[in-house]
Image (cartoon, coloured by chain):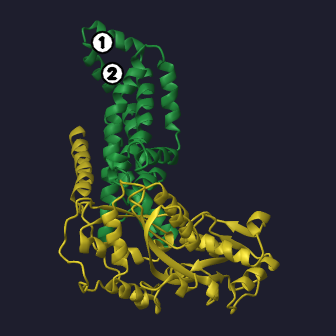
Chain colours: A yellow, B green
Amino acid sequence: MKQRTLRSLSIILAGVALLAACAPAASTPVVVPTAEAPTLAPTAAPTARPAPESPDVILATTTSTQDSGLLDVLVPLFEEHTGYRVKTIAVGTGQALQMGQEGNADVLLVHAPASEKTFMEGGYGKDRFLVMHNDFIFVGPASDPAAIKGGSDAVVALTKIHEAAASFVSRGDKSGTHSKELALWKSAGLDPATEKASWYIESGQGMGATLTIASEKSAYTLTDRATYLATRANLQLGLLVEKDNALLNVYHVITVNPELWPKVNYDGAIAFAKWLTEPGIQSLISEFGVDEFGEPLFIPDAGKTDAELGL
Amino acid sequence: MDLEVLQITALSLQISALATAISLLLGLPFGTLLGLGTFRGRSFLLSLMNTGMGLPPVVVGLVVAMSLWRSGPLGDLKLIYTPAAIVIAQVVIAFPVAAGLTAAALQALDPRLQLQLLGLGASRWQMIWLLWREARLPLLAALMAAFGSVISEVGASMMVGGNIRHQTRVLTTAIVLETGKGAFELAIQLAVLLLGITFLVNVALTRIQQRGARR
Protein backbone atom coordinates (compact mmCIF):
# COMPACT_ATOMS: atom_id res chain seq x y z
CA MET A 1 0.00 0.00 0.00
CA LYS A 2 2.80 2.37 0.92
CA GLN A 3 4.63 1.74 -2.37
CA ARG A 4 1.55 2.31 -4.47
CA THR A 5 0.59 5.46 -2.62
CA LEU A 6 4.10 6.81 -2.97
CA ARG A 7 4.09 6.11 -6.68
CA SER A 8 0.73 7.70 -7.33
CA LEU A 9 1.72 10.73 -5.29
CA SER A 10 4.94 11.12 -7.24
CA ILE A 11 3.00 10.93 -10.47
CA ILE A 12 0.53 13.59 -9.36
CA LEU A 13 3.26 15.92 -8.12
CA ALA A 14 5.36 15.31 -11.22
CA GLY A 15 2.34 16.15 -13.33
CA VAL A 16 1.87 19.42 -11.51
CA ALA A 17 5.57 20.24 -11.80
CA LEU A 18 5.57 19.39 -15.50
CA LEU A 19 2.59 21.64 -16.07
CA ALA A 20 4.38 24.45 -14.32
CA ALA A 21 7.65 23.93 -16.15
CA CYS A 22 6.47 23.09 -19.64
CA ALA A 23 4.20 26.01 -20.42
CA PRO A 24 5.63 28.88 -22.46
CA ALA A 25 7.86 31.10 -20.36
CA ALA A 26 6.12 34.19 -19.05
CA SER A 27 8.86 36.46 -20.31
CA THR A 28 8.34 36.02 -24.06
CA PRO A 29 5.27 37.91 -25.26
CA VAL A 30 2.89 35.58 -27.07
CA VAL A 31 1.08 37.49 -29.77
CA VAL A 32 -2.56 36.43 -29.84
CA PRO A 33 -4.02 38.59 -32.61
CA THR A 34 -7.64 39.52 -32.17
CA ALA A 35 -7.58 41.66 -35.29
CA GLU A 36 -5.40 41.04 -38.29
CA ALA A 37 -1.95 42.44 -37.60
CA PRO A 38 -1.04 44.46 -40.68
CA THR A 39 2.53 44.81 -41.81
CA LEU A 40 3.66 48.23 -40.71
CA ALA A 41 4.91 50.50 -43.47
CA PRO A 42 8.14 51.93 -42.05
CA THR A 43 7.65 55.65 -41.80
CA ALA A 44 10.80 57.20 -40.39
CA ALA A 45 12.18 54.85 -37.73
CA PRO A 46 14.08 51.74 -38.78
CA THR A 47 12.11 48.53 -38.34
CA ALA A 48 15.12 46.57 -37.10
CA ARG A 49 14.88 45.94 -33.37
CA PRO A 50 17.45 48.10 -31.65
CA ALA A 51 17.35 46.10 -28.38
CA PRO A 52 17.03 49.12 -26.07
CA GLU A 53 19.12 49.16 -22.93
CA SER A 54 16.15 49.93 -20.70
CA PRO A 55 13.51 47.68 -22.16
CA ASP A 56 10.79 48.14 -19.55
CA VAL A 57 8.21 50.84 -20.16
CA ILE A 58 5.43 51.33 -17.63
CA LEU A 59 2.26 52.50 -19.37
CA ALA A 60 -0.43 53.75 -17.03
CA THR A 61 -3.74 53.84 -18.81
CA THR A 62 -7.45 53.76 -18.29
CA THR A 63 -9.73 50.79 -17.86
CA SER A 64 -11.67 51.85 -20.96
CA THR A 65 -8.70 51.37 -23.29
CA GLN A 66 -8.04 48.00 -21.77
CA ASP A 67 -11.65 46.77 -21.54
CA SER A 68 -12.25 47.65 -25.19
CA GLY A 69 -9.38 45.37 -26.22
CA LEU A 70 -7.49 48.05 -28.17
CA LEU A 71 -4.30 47.77 -26.12
CA ASP A 72 -4.27 44.00 -26.51
CA VAL A 73 -3.75 44.67 -30.21
CA LEU A 74 -1.47 47.72 -30.07
CA VAL A 75 0.94 46.78 -27.30
CA PRO A 76 2.23 43.49 -28.78
CA LEU A 77 2.77 45.27 -32.10
CA PHE A 78 4.79 47.99 -30.40
CA GLU A 79 6.84 45.42 -28.48
CA GLU A 80 7.60 43.50 -31.66
CA HIS A 81 8.44 46.63 -33.58
CA THR A 82 10.77 48.21 -31.05
CA GLY A 83 11.93 45.56 -28.61
CA TYR A 84 10.55 47.43 -25.60
CA ARG A 85 8.57 45.52 -23.03
CA VAL A 86 5.45 47.40 -22.05
CA LYS A 87 3.91 46.96 -18.64
CA THR A 88 0.33 48.09 -19.09
CA ILE A 89 -1.23 49.07 -15.81
CA ALA A 90 -4.93 49.75 -16.31
CA VAL A 91 -6.19 51.96 -13.54
CA GLY A 92 -8.46 54.99 -13.65
CA THR A 93 -7.22 58.24 -15.19
CA GLY A 94 -6.97 59.70 -11.69
CA GLN A 95 -4.58 57.02 -10.51
CA ALA A 96 -2.66 57.08 -13.80
CA LEU A 97 -2.02 60.81 -13.42
CA GLN A 98 -1.03 60.26 -9.80
CA MET A 99 1.43 57.58 -10.88
CA GLY A 100 2.87 60.02 -13.41
CA GLN A 101 3.18 62.69 -10.75
CA GLU A 102 5.18 60.33 -8.56
CA GLY A 103 7.34 59.00 -11.35
CA ASN A 104 5.89 55.50 -11.00
CA ALA A 105 4.94 55.36 -14.67
CA ASP A 106 6.81 56.29 -17.85
CA VAL A 107 3.98 57.12 -20.21
CA LEU A 108 0.26 57.77 -19.72
CA LEU A 109 -2.66 57.20 -22.08
CA VAL A 110 -5.58 59.01 -20.49
CA HIS A 111 -8.78 60.87 -21.28
CA ALA A 112 -9.48 63.68 -18.84
CA PRO A 113 -8.34 66.85 -20.64
CA ALA A 114 -9.03 69.18 -17.72
CA SER A 115 -7.00 67.08 -15.25
CA GLU A 116 -4.33 66.58 -17.89
CA LYS A 117 -3.94 70.34 -18.32
CA THR A 118 -3.40 70.70 -14.57
CA PHE A 119 -0.89 67.86 -14.78
CA MET A 120 1.06 69.54 -17.59
CA GLU A 121 0.92 72.94 -15.89
CA GLY A 122 2.45 71.33 -12.82
CA GLY A 123 5.41 70.33 -14.97
CA TYR A 124 4.87 66.62 -14.46
CA GLY A 125 4.57 65.76 -18.14
CA LYS A 126 6.98 66.52 -20.94
CA ASP A 127 5.17 65.74 -24.20
CA ARG A 128 1.45 65.51 -24.78
CA PHE A 129 0.04 64.27 -28.07
CA LEU A 130 -3.56 63.92 -29.18
CA VAL A 131 -4.16 60.29 -30.13
CA MET A 132 -7.79 59.52 -30.77
CA HIS A 133 -11.31 60.09 -29.58
CA ASN A 134 -14.58 58.33 -29.29
CA ASP A 135 -17.67 59.47 -27.56
CA PHE A 136 -19.63 58.88 -24.43
CA ILE A 137 -23.17 57.64 -24.53
CA PHE A 138 -25.96 57.26 -22.03
CA VAL A 139 -27.22 53.72 -21.66
CA GLY A 140 -30.04 52.44 -19.55
CA PRO A 141 -32.83 49.92 -19.12
CA ALA A 142 -35.38 49.28 -21.82
CA SER A 143 -38.11 50.55 -19.48
CA ASP A 144 -36.44 54.00 -19.54
CA PRO A 145 -38.22 55.48 -16.49
CA ALA A 146 -36.77 58.97 -17.12
CA ALA A 147 -37.80 58.90 -20.80
CA ILE A 148 -34.47 60.04 -22.20
CA LYS A 149 -34.35 57.73 -25.20
CA GLY A 150 -33.60 59.30 -28.54
CA GLY A 151 -32.30 62.51 -27.07
CA SER A 152 -29.08 64.14 -28.20
CA ASP A 153 -28.51 66.52 -25.32
CA ALA A 154 -26.55 65.27 -22.33
CA VAL A 155 -27.63 68.01 -19.95
CA VAL A 156 -31.32 67.48 -20.77
CA ALA A 157 -30.93 63.74 -20.18
CA LEU A 158 -29.28 64.25 -16.78
CA THR A 159 -31.93 66.77 -15.75
CA LYS A 160 -34.67 64.26 -16.62
CA ILE A 161 -32.90 61.51 -14.66
CA HIS A 162 -32.59 63.81 -11.66
CA GLU A 163 -36.25 64.80 -11.84
CA ALA A 164 -37.39 61.19 -12.13
CA ALA A 165 -34.97 60.15 -9.37
CA ALA A 166 -34.09 57.24 -11.64
CA SER A 167 -31.21 54.97 -10.62
CA PHE A 168 -27.93 56.16 -12.04
CA VAL A 169 -24.58 54.44 -11.62
CA SER A 170 -21.51 56.65 -11.45
CA ARG A 171 -17.91 55.48 -11.79
CA GLY A 172 -17.07 57.35 -8.62
CA ASP A 173 -13.33 56.70 -9.10
CA LYS A 174 -11.82 59.93 -10.48
CA SER A 175 -11.50 58.32 -13.89
CA GLY A 176 -11.84 60.19 -17.18
CA THR A 177 -15.41 58.98 -17.47
CA HIS A 178 -16.14 60.12 -13.94
CA SER A 179 -14.66 63.55 -14.64
CA LYS A 180 -16.83 63.89 -17.74
CA GLU A 181 -19.90 62.85 -15.80
CA LEU A 182 -19.25 65.36 -13.04
CA ALA A 183 -18.66 68.12 -15.60
CA LEU A 184 -22.01 67.32 -17.23
CA TRP A 185 -23.85 67.41 -13.89
CA LYS A 186 -22.22 70.77 -13.27
CA SER A 187 -23.41 72.07 -16.63
CA ALA A 188 -26.91 70.99 -15.64
CA GLY A 189 -26.56 72.82 -12.35
CA LEU A 190 -27.08 69.62 -10.37
CA ASP A 191 -24.96 67.76 -7.80
CA PRO A 192 -26.37 64.35 -6.79
CA ALA A 193 -23.06 63.28 -5.31
CA THR A 194 -23.09 66.01 -2.67
CA GLU A 195 -26.85 65.65 -2.19
CA LYS A 196 -26.16 61.99 -1.44
CA ALA A 197 -29.17 61.15 -3.55
CA SER A 198 -30.35 57.61 -2.89
CA TRP A 199 -30.75 56.87 -6.59
CA TYR A 200 -27.13 57.91 -7.32
CA ILE A 201 -24.92 54.82 -7.07
CA GLU A 202 -21.13 55.18 -6.98
CA SER A 203 -19.43 51.95 -8.01
CA GLY A 204 -15.78 52.95 -7.62
CA GLN A 205 -14.86 50.46 -10.30
CA GLY A 206 -13.87 50.25 -13.95
CA MET A 207 -16.25 50.75 -16.87
CA GLY A 208 -16.95 47.08 -17.48
CA ALA A 209 -17.86 46.42 -13.87
CA THR A 210 -19.92 49.62 -13.67
CA LEU A 211 -21.91 48.60 -16.75
CA THR A 212 -22.61 45.24 -15.15
CA ILE A 213 -23.89 46.96 -12.02
CA ALA A 214 -26.11 49.25 -14.10
CA SER A 215 -27.43 46.27 -16.03
CA GLU A 216 -28.20 44.31 -12.87
CA LYS A 217 -29.86 47.26 -11.15
CA SER A 218 -31.71 48.46 -14.28
CA ALA A 219 -30.03 51.81 -13.92
CA TYR A 220 -28.70 54.48 -16.26
CA THR A 221 -25.03 55.15 -16.67
CA LEU A 222 -22.59 57.16 -18.75
CA THR A 223 -20.16 54.99 -20.69
CA ASP A 224 -17.71 55.33 -23.54
CA ARG A 225 -18.99 53.79 -26.73
CA ALA A 226 -16.04 51.40 -27.08
CA THR A 227 -16.53 49.59 -23.78
CA TYR A 228 -20.28 49.44 -24.31
CA LEU A 229 -19.91 47.86 -27.74
CA ALA A 230 -17.32 45.42 -26.48
CA THR A 231 -19.44 44.25 -23.55
CA ARG A 232 -22.96 44.80 -24.92
CA ALA A 233 -23.69 41.10 -25.34
CA ASN A 234 -23.61 40.55 -21.58
CA LEU A 235 -25.73 43.55 -20.67
CA GLN A 236 -29.40 44.40 -20.61
CA LEU A 237 -28.85 48.04 -21.41
CA GLY A 238 -29.81 50.00 -24.49
CA LEU A 239 -28.17 53.01 -26.09
CA LEU A 240 -30.38 55.95 -25.22
CA VAL A 241 -28.62 59.27 -25.74
CA GLU A 242 -25.72 60.04 -28.05
CA LYS A 243 -24.09 62.55 -30.38
CA ASP A 244 -23.90 65.59 -28.18
CA ASN A 245 -20.75 67.64 -28.68
CA ALA A 246 -20.39 67.70 -24.92
CA LEU A 247 -20.01 63.91 -24.99
CA LEU A 248 -16.73 63.84 -26.89
CA ASN A 249 -14.11 61.61 -25.25
CA VAL A 250 -10.59 62.59 -26.20
CA TYR A 251 -7.46 60.55 -25.50
CA HIS A 252 -3.98 61.97 -25.14
CA VAL A 253 -0.65 60.26 -24.60
CA ILE A 254 1.66 61.98 -22.13
CA THR A 255 5.31 61.24 -21.37
CA VAL A 256 6.35 61.71 -17.75
CA ASN A 257 8.91 64.48 -17.29
CA PRO A 258 12.37 62.92 -16.88
CA GLU A 259 13.76 66.15 -15.46
CA LEU A 260 11.50 65.67 -12.47
CA TRP A 261 11.99 61.91 -12.28
CA PRO A 262 15.34 60.79 -13.70
CA LYS A 263 14.42 57.15 -13.22
CA VAL A 264 11.67 57.17 -15.84
CA ASN A 265 12.38 55.47 -19.14
CA TYR A 266 11.93 58.56 -21.31
CA ASP A 267 13.29 56.94 -24.46
CA GLY A 268 10.75 54.19 -24.24
CA ALA A 269 7.98 56.61 -23.32
CA ILE A 270 8.57 58.96 -26.23
CA ALA A 271 8.98 56.00 -28.59
CA PHE A 272 5.55 54.75 -27.56
CA ALA A 273 3.97 58.18 -27.73
CA LYS A 274 5.31 58.85 -31.20
CA TRP A 275 4.44 55.36 -32.39
CA LEU A 276 0.80 55.83 -31.41
CA THR A 277 0.60 58.85 -33.66
CA GLU A 278 2.23 57.21 -36.70
CA PRO A 279 -0.02 56.99 -39.76
CA GLY A 280 0.15 53.18 -39.87
CA ILE A 281 -1.00 52.83 -36.28
CA GLN A 282 -3.58 55.57 -36.63
CA SER A 283 -5.17 53.69 -39.50
CA LEU A 284 -5.07 50.52 -37.39
CA ILE A 285 -6.94 52.38 -34.67
CA SER A 286 -9.55 53.52 -37.17
CA GLU A 287 -10.17 49.91 -38.19
CA PHE A 288 -10.30 48.47 -34.70
CA GLY A 289 -13.67 46.96 -33.92
CA VAL A 290 -15.20 47.30 -37.38
CA ASP A 291 -15.21 43.57 -38.05
CA GLU A 292 -16.71 42.68 -34.72
CA PHE A 293 -19.07 45.57 -34.07
CA GLY A 294 -19.73 47.09 -37.47
CA GLU A 295 -18.30 50.43 -36.40
CA PRO A 296 -14.89 51.62 -35.27
CA LEU A 297 -14.50 51.96 -31.53
CA PHE A 298 -12.03 54.85 -31.74
CA ILE A 299 -11.43 57.63 -34.24
CA PRO A 300 -7.78 58.60 -34.80
CA ASP A 301 -6.87 62.25 -34.39
CA ALA A 302 -3.09 62.59 -34.40
CA GLY A 303 -1.87 65.86 -35.79
CA LYS A 304 -5.02 67.79 -35.02
CA THR A 305 -5.09 70.48 -32.38
CA ASP A 306 -7.12 70.31 -29.19
CA ALA A 307 -9.15 73.27 -30.39
CA GLU A 308 -10.37 71.34 -33.42
CA LEU A 309 -12.03 68.92 -31.06
CA GLY A 310 -13.63 71.62 -28.99
CA LEU A 311 -11.28 71.41 -26.04
CA MET B 1 -7.03 31.91 -25.70
CA ASP B 2 -6.13 28.37 -24.63
CA LEU B 3 -2.41 28.89 -24.90
CA GLU B 4 -2.74 32.00 -22.84
CA VAL B 5 -4.82 30.19 -20.21
CA LEU B 6 -2.13 27.53 -19.97
CA GLN B 7 0.52 30.19 -19.55
CA ILE B 8 -1.51 31.99 -16.87
CA THR B 9 -2.03 28.71 -15.00
CA ALA B 10 1.65 27.82 -15.18
CA LEU B 11 2.62 31.27 -13.91
CA SER B 12 0.14 31.01 -11.01
CA LEU B 13 1.60 27.67 -9.98
CA GLN B 14 5.19 28.79 -10.34
CA ILE B 15 4.67 31.90 -8.27
CA SER B 16 2.62 30.28 -5.53
CA ALA B 17 4.82 27.18 -5.34
CA LEU B 18 7.93 29.33 -5.00
CA ALA B 19 6.30 31.61 -2.45
CA THR B 20 5.09 28.63 -0.41
CA ALA B 21 8.54 27.03 -0.53
CA ILE B 22 10.29 30.21 0.61
CA SER B 23 7.75 30.88 3.33
CA LEU B 24 8.30 27.35 4.62
CA LEU B 25 12.06 27.65 4.40
CA LEU B 26 11.80 30.70 6.61
CA GLY B 27 8.71 29.78 8.58
CA LEU B 28 9.61 26.26 9.63
CA PRO B 29 12.82 27.18 11.47
CA PHE B 30 11.32 30.34 12.91
CA GLY B 31 8.19 28.50 14.01
CA THR B 32 10.34 25.80 15.59
CA LEU B 33 12.23 28.46 17.52
CA LEU B 34 8.97 29.94 18.70
CA GLY B 35 7.45 26.59 19.53
CA LEU B 36 10.35 24.99 21.37
CA GLY B 37 12.44 27.90 22.51
CA THR B 38 12.32 29.75 25.77
CA PHE B 39 13.40 33.34 25.50
CA ARG B 40 12.09 36.75 26.37
CA GLY B 41 9.65 38.16 23.86
CA ARG B 42 8.64 34.70 22.67
CA SER B 43 4.96 35.06 23.39
CA PHE B 44 4.99 38.55 21.87
CA LEU B 45 6.45 37.14 18.66
CA LEU B 46 3.92 34.35 18.73
CA SER B 47 1.09 36.87 18.97
CA LEU B 48 2.65 38.70 16.05
CA MET B 49 2.68 35.53 13.96
CA ASN B 50 -0.88 34.73 14.86
CA THR B 51 -1.97 38.25 13.95
CA GLY B 52 -0.05 37.86 10.70
CA MET B 53 -2.21 34.89 9.79
CA GLY B 54 -5.17 37.23 9.66
CA LEU B 55 -3.42 40.05 7.80
CA PRO B 56 -5.56 41.25 4.92
CA PRO B 57 -3.62 40.30 1.77
CA VAL B 58 -4.63 43.53 0.07
CA VAL B 59 -2.99 45.51 2.87
CA VAL B 60 0.18 43.46 2.42
CA GLY B 61 -0.06 44.23 -1.30
CA LEU B 62 -0.37 47.95 -0.66
CA VAL B 63 2.63 48.05 1.69
CA VAL B 64 4.82 45.94 -0.60
CA ALA B 65 3.77 48.00 -3.64
CA MET B 66 4.58 51.24 -1.89
CA SER B 67 8.01 49.87 -1.03
CA LEU B 68 8.70 48.64 -4.54
CA TRP B 69 7.43 51.66 -6.48
CA ARG B 70 10.05 53.85 -8.04
CA SER B 71 9.17 56.49 -5.50
CA GLY B 72 9.52 53.94 -2.70
CA PRO B 73 12.59 52.88 -0.71
CA LEU B 74 13.25 49.75 -2.78
CA GLY B 75 12.39 51.28 -6.13
CA ASP B 76 15.87 50.86 -7.53
CA LEU B 77 15.49 47.10 -7.46
CA LYS B 78 13.02 47.51 -10.34
CA LEU B 79 10.89 44.72 -8.98
CA ILE B 80 7.50 46.35 -9.26
CA TYR B 81 5.13 44.73 -11.76
CA THR B 82 7.25 41.58 -12.05
CA PRO B 83 6.48 37.99 -10.95
CA ALA B 84 9.23 38.40 -8.35
CA ALA B 85 7.22 41.18 -6.70
CA ILE B 86 4.21 38.87 -6.44
CA VAL B 87 6.41 36.20 -4.87
CA ILE B 88 7.63 38.71 -2.30
CA ALA B 89 4.11 39.79 -1.39
CA GLN B 90 2.95 36.18 -1.18
CA VAL B 91 5.87 35.23 1.05
CA VAL B 92 4.87 38.03 3.42
CA ILE B 93 1.34 36.60 3.46
CA ALA B 94 2.31 32.95 3.85
CA PHE B 95 5.22 33.28 6.28
CA PRO B 96 3.13 33.99 9.41
CA VAL B 97 0.85 31.10 8.49
CA ALA B 98 3.79 28.72 8.20
CA ALA B 99 5.54 29.99 11.32
CA GLY B 100 2.45 30.22 13.49
CA LEU B 101 1.12 26.79 12.61
CA THR B 102 4.57 25.20 12.99
CA ALA B 103 4.88 26.67 16.46
CA ALA B 104 1.44 25.38 17.40
CA ALA B 105 2.19 21.95 15.95
CA LEU B 106 5.37 21.57 17.96
CA GLN B 107 3.83 22.91 21.13
CA ALA B 108 1.12 20.27 20.82
CA LEU B 109 3.68 17.50 21.16
CA ASP B 110 4.23 15.87 24.48
CA PRO B 111 6.97 17.90 26.17
CA ARG B 112 8.43 14.75 27.64
CA LEU B 113 9.25 13.55 24.14
CA GLN B 114 11.80 16.31 23.78
CA LEU B 115 13.47 15.32 27.06
CA GLN B 116 13.38 11.67 26.15
CA LEU B 117 15.10 12.25 22.84
CA LEU B 118 17.78 14.35 24.45
CA GLY B 119 18.15 11.77 27.16
CA LEU B 120 18.69 9.04 24.58
CA GLY B 121 21.62 11.01 23.23
CA ALA B 122 20.13 12.90 20.32
CA SER B 123 21.89 16.06 19.25
CA ARG B 124 19.83 19.22 19.03
CA TRP B 125 19.43 18.88 15.24
CA GLN B 126 18.47 15.22 15.49
CA MET B 127 15.92 16.10 18.12
CA ILE B 128 14.40 18.82 15.97
CA TRP B 129 14.26 16.52 12.97
CA LEU B 130 12.57 13.77 14.98
CA LEU B 131 10.10 16.25 16.47
CA TRP B 132 9.26 17.43 12.97
CA ARG B 133 8.62 13.89 11.91
CA GLU B 134 6.46 13.35 14.93
CA ALA B 135 4.43 16.44 14.14
CA ARG B 136 4.20 15.83 10.41
CA LEU B 137 0.39 15.77 10.35
CA PRO B 138 -0.08 19.31 11.56
CA LEU B 139 3.09 20.44 9.75
CA LEU B 140 1.73 19.24 6.44
CA ALA B 141 -1.51 20.99 7.30
CA ALA B 142 0.61 24.14 7.75
CA LEU B 143 2.08 23.58 4.30
CA MET B 144 -1.37 23.23 2.77
CA ALA B 145 -2.61 26.31 4.63
CA ALA B 146 0.37 28.34 3.41
CA PHE B 147 -0.18 27.22 -0.17
CA GLY B 148 -3.90 27.84 0.06
CA SER B 149 -3.38 31.34 1.38
CA VAL B 150 -1.33 32.35 -1.67
CA ILE B 151 -2.84 30.46 -4.59
CA SER B 152 -6.20 32.05 -3.86
CA GLU B 153 -4.90 35.52 -3.19
CA VAL B 154 -5.86 38.36 -5.53
CA GLY B 155 -5.47 41.78 -3.87
CA ALA B 156 -1.71 41.76 -3.41
CA SER B 157 -1.09 40.04 -6.75
CA MET B 158 -3.08 42.78 -8.46
CA MET B 159 -1.28 45.63 -6.75
CA VAL B 160 2.32 44.52 -6.98
CA GLY B 161 1.96 42.55 -10.19
CA GLY B 162 -0.29 44.88 -12.15
CA ASN B 163 -2.12 42.02 -13.91
CA ILE B 164 -0.04 42.58 -17.04
CA ARG B 165 -0.84 40.29 -19.93
CA HIS B 166 1.82 37.63 -20.53
CA GLN B 167 3.91 38.94 -17.66
CA THR B 168 2.14 38.99 -14.33
CA ARG B 169 -1.38 37.85 -15.05
CA VAL B 170 -2.24 34.94 -12.78
CA LEU B 171 -5.46 32.96 -12.47
CA THR B 172 -6.98 35.06 -9.71
CA THR B 173 -6.26 38.42 -11.34
CA ALA B 174 -7.41 37.08 -14.70
CA ILE B 175 -10.73 36.10 -13.12
CA VAL B 176 -11.18 39.63 -11.77
CA LEU B 177 -10.33 41.10 -15.17
CA GLU B 178 -12.73 38.91 -17.12
CA THR B 179 -15.49 39.50 -14.58
CA GLY B 180 -14.88 43.25 -14.85
CA LYS B 181 -15.24 42.98 -18.63
CA GLY B 182 -18.44 41.02 -18.28
CA ALA B 183 -16.96 37.84 -19.80
CA PHE B 184 -18.52 35.63 -17.14
CA GLU B 185 -18.18 32.36 -19.00
CA LEU B 186 -14.44 32.72 -19.29
CA ALA B 187 -14.23 33.88 -15.69
CA ILE B 188 -16.04 30.75 -14.54
CA GLN B 189 -13.79 28.54 -16.66
CA LEU B 190 -10.75 30.08 -15.03
CA ALA B 191 -12.34 29.71 -11.61
CA VAL B 192 -12.98 26.00 -12.19
CA LEU B 193 -9.42 25.59 -13.39
CA LEU B 194 -8.08 27.31 -10.28
CA LEU B 195 -10.22 25.16 -8.00
CA GLY B 196 -9.18 22.02 -9.87
CA ILE B 197 -5.48 22.76 -9.58
CA THR B 198 -5.75 23.63 -5.90
CA PHE B 199 -7.70 20.43 -5.31
CA LEU B 200 -5.13 18.26 -7.13
CA VAL B 201 -2.23 19.71 -5.17
CA ASN B 202 -4.06 19.21 -1.92
CA VAL B 203 -5.04 15.64 -2.80
CA ALA B 204 -1.37 14.85 -3.23
CA LEU B 205 -0.36 16.57 -0.03
CA THR B 206 -3.19 15.03 1.95
CA ARG B 207 -2.18 11.56 0.87
CA ILE B 208 1.35 12.23 2.04
CA GLN B 209 -0.01 13.62 5.26
CA GLN B 210 -2.31 10.70 5.92
CA ARG B 211 0.29 8.10 5.08
CA GLY B 212 1.34 7.74 8.69
CA ALA B 213 -1.98 8.49 10.29
CA ARG B 214 -3.56 5.96 12.54
CA ARG B 215 -7.01 6.01 10.95
Position in image of residue A78 (x %, y %): 30, 74
Q: Is residue A240 visible?
A: yes
Q: Are marks 2 and 1 on the same chain?
A: yes
Q: How many marks?
A: 2
Label 2 sits on what residue type? Leu
Residue at position x 76%, y 70% in the image: A191
Chain assignment, label 2: B
Classify 10 Å Cα crowding around label 1: few (below 14), some (14-19), many (20 and above): some
Q: Which mark is residue B131?
A: 2
Quadrant of the image for the N terminus of chain A?
top left
Vertical order, B115 against A196 (above or below)? above
Q: Is residue B15 left or right of residue A91?
A: left
Label 1 sits on what residue type? Leu
In terms of secondary structure, where does tag 2 sit?
helix
Q: Is residue A137 left or right of residue B118?
A: right
Residue highlighted by disc 1 = B117
